[in-house]
Image (cartoon, helix red, strand yellow):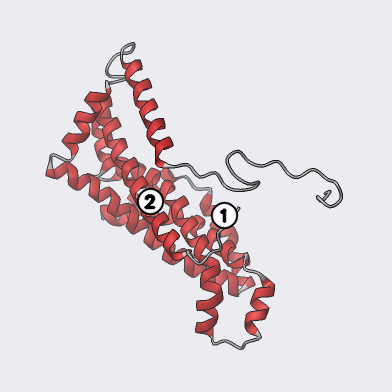
Amino acid sequence: MASLSDGGAPPPKAAGGHAGAPRRFGKFEGVVAIAGLAVAWQIASYFFPSFLFPPVPAIAERFVEIFSSLDTTLDAFATGGRILLGLAGAFILGGALAALMARSSMFERYAYPLLSFNQGIPALSWVVIAIIWFKGIEFRIFFIMVMTTLPGFTFQLLDAYRSMSDDLYEMTLSFRPSRYDLLRTLIWPAVLPGIFTSWKVNLGNASRVVVVAELVGATGGVGYQLLLQQQVFDMAGAIAWTIVLVIFVLVVQSLITLIETHALRYRAVSER
């Protein structure tokens, strides 16, 4: 590739920033996009039956009703708790597996194919298996959440560890650090960005899986409420419950991003 000193042309800059910089959008663009979607939905409600495209005010009314009743409010919080509990279990187990795979090539040769096999099993299959194997509803959902998100956590944490610079690792060993110092000063900062990424990616996967689990094997939660709306063809209620789940995911993602920004504040910031 020709350099600038050789007369080569400089690489084209990305719109709004320097070349290779990730685009960052503010809250304004998100509000405009959501408002545009709401307007398009409202326009569609004038041309289609209400059971297909209910008006936006009807959806907003159903959304308010969800948090006006204690039972439906508890259903919303139950789904959020199940998502976080399942992700926490998968993260702990996935971290342990990633550590073992990083330390033992023999263990990795046997564990990697099993995790890849697990990754190909659909969530609905785990729902059926959990219903047959276990009696308790909450443990069923926890098992489903762990099994569907475990491969993602394990692979992402393992890749984060292996992306650590070998030269930096050898240089750190030259100071003869203790295991705790090595973990604190090198390994932990190296894998921390991967931890945040794995949580943000698996949060979206978990929100889809928990609905399937509750839809089939639960008597409460967002998935169960969606089943009730489907039985009475209440599209406004179905959209309202879907918005509840989306808001939960956005709030948790924002919290993760906030923690990530604080934890990785030591990173160098480009002056360009």
Residue to which mark 1 is pinned: 116
Separation of marks 2 and 1 at Cα, in angstroms:
30 Å
Q: How many marks?
A: 2
Instruction: Give the residue number, with chain letter if any, for mark 2.
Output: 254
- The picture places residue 254, in percent across and down from the top left corner, at 38, 51
Q: Say which element carries label 2.
A: helix
Rendered image quadrant of residue 226: top left
Q: Amino acid at mark 1?
A: Ser
Percent of width and height locating residue 89: 38, 62
In this view, the residue farthest toward the left is: 69
- Please report the residue visible at 60 percent of the width from the left and 65 percent of the height from the top: 110
What's the residue type where badge 2 is placed? Ser
Where does residue 113 sit, x and y in percent of width and height?
A: 59, 58
Q: Is residue 103 visible?
A: yes
Vertical comparison of 29 with 105: above or below? above
Task: Say which label, 2 or 1, has the lower sequence index.
Answer: 1
Tag 1, which secondary structure? helix
